[in-house]
Image (cartoon, rainbow, N blue to C red):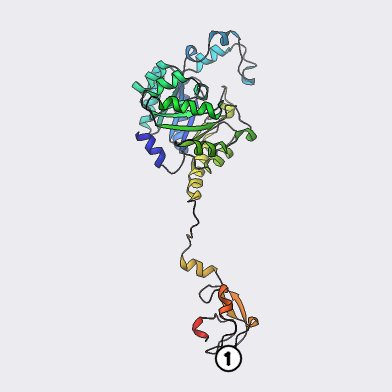
Amino acid sequence: MKFFNKIKKLNRPYIIAEIGANHNGSLGLAKKLILKAKDAGADCVKFQSWTKNSIFSKKKYKENYFLKDDYRNRKDYTLESIVEKFSLSENLLLKLKSFCDKNKIDFTSTPFSKREVDFLVKKLKPPFIKIASMDLNNYPFLEYVAKKNKTIVLSTGLSNLSEIKKAVKTIESKKNYKIIILHCVAIYPTPDNLSNINSIDVLKKVFKYPIGYSDHTLGFGVSLAAASKNICLLEKHFTLDKKMFGWDHKVSITPDELKIICRESKRITKALGSKSIVVPESKKRKEEFRRSIVITKDLKTGHRIKEADLDFKRPGTGIPPGKIFNVIGKKMKKNLSKDSILLFKDIN
């Protein structure tokens, strides 16, 4: 409940740098990514806990599938070998958790099996458990995770509204009401015209839970647009080099881009303000900018004021323009020179 309450009160997006498999199986690279994410201002780094036995079936491996264009010239790599190379052992996850603790940045890792959930909760003790979009309709898995009584961050890619509702009810059925729902489109990269960040408004209307965004578009523009929806959490894939070998580097942001997201999303949230019309300017500021009624020529005592005698100029310390009909037809009580600000005490 501590993390869930923190998110609700944060008043800015909680930023997750999704390292995923961008460590390429290297502990050293993973540590560099953690430090760069911390330096950029991210709140959390997220990895993925899977093995070649917990994510794909043998049938999928037998298809001898080569991943995207990155791998067309790497015929020695099959899907199975890539998955095995980029998986993190429990020992490596423990080292990464310890490194994050030392550097004061939150750590978590998306689990894809019950064993990985157990290890995550018992040994790694993350602030929340992230459910990948692929598992939103994996209701037995959702029930298992829900019973751990941790905050659940639920990605909604691949799913329609009825499926999202069923997933939420499944989690709630285990008396777990610490849910954060992320709008997500599971296309890598997501074209801007398919991002549909207005879905965030729908999710806010339908669900009582905090709503965030898992962004798979290129660059940082759409992330900042989502921040204008007053989201509670923003997740974005993160790399040191978009040209690096691996399956998510091309759709990830760099440290400089992450810095922009962390800095500007905070500004955007502050700028949103309230949903009522407020006047933040001081009385002095208003007087400096607004206009007063001034006279267009020298006027003498007893002169009956006509509209042609009047103009409007700054500052707004005299009679406001809206009171002009309370002035026309009145007589001057004193002599005033051209361009003087007119006051009610100057007229009968």
Q: In this rendering, does residue 307 appear at all? A: yes
Q: In this rendering, does residue 242 appear at all? A: no
Q: Pointer 1: what residue?
A: 300
Instruction: Locate residue 297, reporting x and y percent.
Output: 62, 85
Q: Quadrant of the N terminus?
A: top left
In this rendering, position of residue 266 left or right of residue 74:
left
Element type at marker 1? loop
Q: Residue at x 60, y 11 (%)?
A: 76
Instruction: Locate residue 54, reporting x and y percent.
Output: 47, 14
In this rendering, position of residue 32 left or right of residue 332:
left
* 240 to 74, vertically: above or below: below
Question: In the picture, residue 66 is in which quadrant?
Answer: top right
Number of numbered discs on residues: 1
Question: In the picture, residue 292 is in which quadrant?
Answer: bottom right
Q: Residue at x 54, y 12 (%)?
A: 81
Residue in the foreground of this view, choosing between 84 and 308: 308
Q: Residue at x 34, y 35 (%)?
A: 2
Q: Residues within 10 Å of mark 1 (few under 14, many from 20)?
A: some
* 203 to 270, vertically: above or below: above
Residue in the foreground of this view, choosing between 89 and 294: 294
Question: In the picture, residue 305 is in which quadrant?
Answer: bottom right
User: Which amino acid, mark 1?
Assistant: Lys
Residue in the foreground of this view, choosing between 6 and 30: 6
Instruction: Locate residue 286, reporting x and y percent.
Output: 50, 67
Instruction: Locate residue 55, reporting x and y percent.
Output: 50, 15
